Amino acid sequence: MRTLEAKRSTTQPRSAIETVVRELRRSPLLALIFFVPVVILLERMAPEAHTLLFFVAIAAIVPLAALLSRATESVAAKTGDAVGGLLNATLGNLTELIITLAALQAGQYLLVKASIAGAIVTNSLFMFGGAFLIGGLKHHLQEFNRVNARFQASLLFLATIAILVPSLTSGLDRTPAGEFSQQLSLGLAILLIAVYGLGMVFSLKTHKELFASVGQAEAGEEPWPLSIGIVVLIVVTLLVAIVSEIFVGSVQAAAQHLGLTPAFVGFIVIALVGGAAEMTTAFSAARANRLDLSVGIALGSAAQIALFVAPVLVIVSYFIGPQPMSLEFWPGAVAMMLVATMAATLLSNGGHAAWYAGVMALAVYAIFALTLFLLPPGVTQ
């Protein structure tokens, strides 16, 4: 009897700290965690070294994303893939929200709108397609709940239409202050937040049986206890917020030094860095044949940005911005969001995934990235 108790005591973690230390030793990628205190100290000692801070901040976000991914997978194992995907999307979007709030306060509305559009396109094409590719390279054919995928894609399409309307009617607004566009954007922001809230009630409460996972997940690493997973999520999220603020403070000057346009920085760089945590979880879940979790993260995050984050920024701009922000985007961004939404809808229609479908989605994303990289400065102003 004592022998059995001794074996159990050796297999169970004694504390949350010992569990985290064991994970740090198991994953070599987490060795980059030392960049977190480095970037915080560097920001205090050499705040003018923007380019160096830019790269060190990116290196610091990588291990934090890995920890956030591991903790979210543990929580998802206890709560289910639908709740796990929503939780990861919410915490992952916190980085984008912090970055855009800082840019909003500085009056950099082009960077804010590029970040919003870039996050929607990156999640719908790069993350979604990457999950199909990585999962398909290991599994011949994967299945996922197409009801959940089409639901998220429909929400995303609705939000894209709400962004399209102010852009189409911008020519009707002849007032100097753009009152029509601002009033329309404020009304649409309130409407989108209400629709998003009702969507959560529909998917998590009244019709949650429609969103159950259909894939057969592989046996992987033993998940953390729920309490440890939640604690790690909270701590890592706070650290991501701190590093993101440093990243925001250096990204503009570093971009100018590297010859990058604000559109490319917001659309590509900030979207990839801000979504690093979500991508890590989505890709690892797809490889473990948990494609429902990957789809929930990718499309759920895109829908949350379009239906919640963007409307919140419009409302908050009345309080912290130099002037109210509208939902009017430049035509190229609107076109890219529409194409990304249609591509996600087509990919999610059948409920099956193969690696070449991921290649096609990534190819569309690469076309957008190359276009923005070569775009002359000032075209999107």
Image (spheres, rainbow, N blue to C red):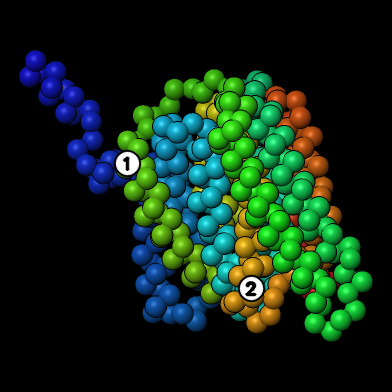
Query: Residue reaching furthest top?
Result: 1
Q: Which amino acid does label 1 sit on?
A: Ser
Please determine whether, in this image, residue 207 is positioned above or below residue 279: above
Position of the N terminus, as image quadrant, is: top left
Count of all numbered marks drawn on residues in the image:
2
The residue identified by callout 2 is 317
x and y percentages locating residue 254 in the rendered image: 60, 73
Q: Residue at x 58, y 30 (%)?
A: 208
Question: Could you say which disc has been placed on residue 119 in the image?
Answer: none
Q: Position of residue 272 (x, y in %)?
A: 61, 54
Q: Which residue is drawn at 41% across and 42% down?
A: 71
* Gap in angstroms between the C-alphas marked 2 and 1: 36 Å
Left-right relation of 33 to 343: left
Q: Where is residue 154 in the image (x, y as percent from the top left)?
A: 74, 41
Q: Nearer the viewer, mark 2 or mark 1?
A: 2
Type of residue at label 2? Ser
Q: Residue placed at 46% from the left, 80% from the top? A: 47
Residue sticking out furthest to the front: 206
Q: Is residue 278 left or right of residue 17?
A: right
Q: Residues within 10 Å of mark 1 (few under 14, many from 20)?
A: few
Q: What element carries label 1?
A: helix
Indicate the secondary structure of the residue bearing disc 2: helix
